[in-house]
Image (tube, rainbow, N blue to C red):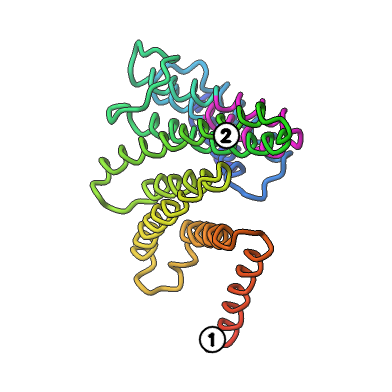
Amino acid sequence: FAAAARMLDPAAYPFQVAECLIGQARVVYQKATATTAELIAAREMVEDGRRLLEPLADTDSRQSREQGNALAWLIAQRIADREEDLVRREELLAEVRDNLWLSYESRRSIIRPGHNATERSAPEPGDGLGSERAFYNLAGVNIQLAKVHHKLAMRLGEDPGDAGNLLGQIAKDLEQAANVYATVRALRELRYGGRPHPHLAACVHGQALVAYFRAVLLGQTGELADTFRFAAEAMEQRRKVASGLAGPGSEAVLRNGDMQKSVDFIMKAAAVTILDRRGNMADGTAAVTRICDEAGEEWSSHPAR
């Protein structure tokens, strides 16, 4: 992207240069170790690309410009997650959610001329991949809002009224995330006809996340059973995809990035389940530590390769 942007004249190739700028910013957004300064610079790069697209009226340019807008707000979400002031973090995340909704509806209005961009309705099969992906973005910010609302509720624990209102908000946040994952999952199941796919697995994994956070944030520990159900289903899809690329039985299958996400998440869910079963943190932590120690001892004696 960077090499192409240096070679191309923005006046002659505005769409291509914009694509290069937005593409570079997306790489930074997807880098887990990106600093706040890097994220801010990436968001500015997105806006530079969007300015190049602004005069272009064709559908691809309009979609790309709105896609860049969504990316700018997703970058803003990552920056907001680092805000230490919880009240301010909540405000920033709420702003991100509102703008991701507007961006999603704007994507739909490009596909559906005359569509009311303030309607806030779920995507349909005819709305295309762009609208579907834009709608999917809403799940993550709702989970982040649920987490910050929980932290605020813990702070206000001495005031049952305020804490209770926030617990109700957590439930709404997670319900919105659940609706997004279920809606997009249905669309992707229709598209892929039962075949495993990374994007479909991401939706199923998202359903596992919602169940997990209902357990840990709302105390609905019965949801942990659904956590494992969805997580295992997502992991199996990811295993099939990775095996198709690397070959069955290959060590590369478990080193696949999506597989690693599933393994790490299932381990965390298992630890929470053990903590809940033990009834108190001291006994639960001791049980988790014992299991990890046993695994470490057994693995240390595995045959050298």
Residue 302's tag is 1
Return the x and y of residue 23 as percentages of the image width and height. Answer: 54, 39
- Between 6 and 47, the one lying in front of the other is 47
The residue positioned 42% from the left and 34% from the top of the image is 180
> Which of the 4 image quadrants contains residue 179?
top left
> Which of the 4 image quadrants contains residue 207?
top left
Q: Is residue 138 above or below residue 276?
A: above
Return the x and y of residue 46 as percentages of the image width and height. Answer: 59, 30
User: Is residue 84 magenta-colored?
Assistant: yes
- Between 31 and 1, the one lying in front of the other is 31
User: Is residue 161 magenta-colored?
Assistant: no
Tell me the magenta residue range.
68-97
The residue positioned 40% from the left and 52% from the top of the image is 230
- Secondary structure, magenta segment, majority class: helix
The residue positioned 62% from the left and 74% from the top of the image is 290
Q: Amino acid at mark 2?
A: Leu
**Local crowd size for mark 1, using a 10 Å CA cut-off: few (<14), some (14–19), many (≥20):** few
- Which element carries disc 2, helix, strand or loop? helix
Which residue is labeled 2 in the image? 74
- Position of 239 with respect to 22 (left or right) is left
The residue positioned 45% from the left and 45% from the top of the image is 206
- Position of 192 with respect to 129 (left or right) is left
Q: Is residue 54 above or below residue 73?
A: above
Return the x and y of residue 28 as percentages of the image width and height. Answer: 62, 43
Q: Amino acid at mark 1?
A: His
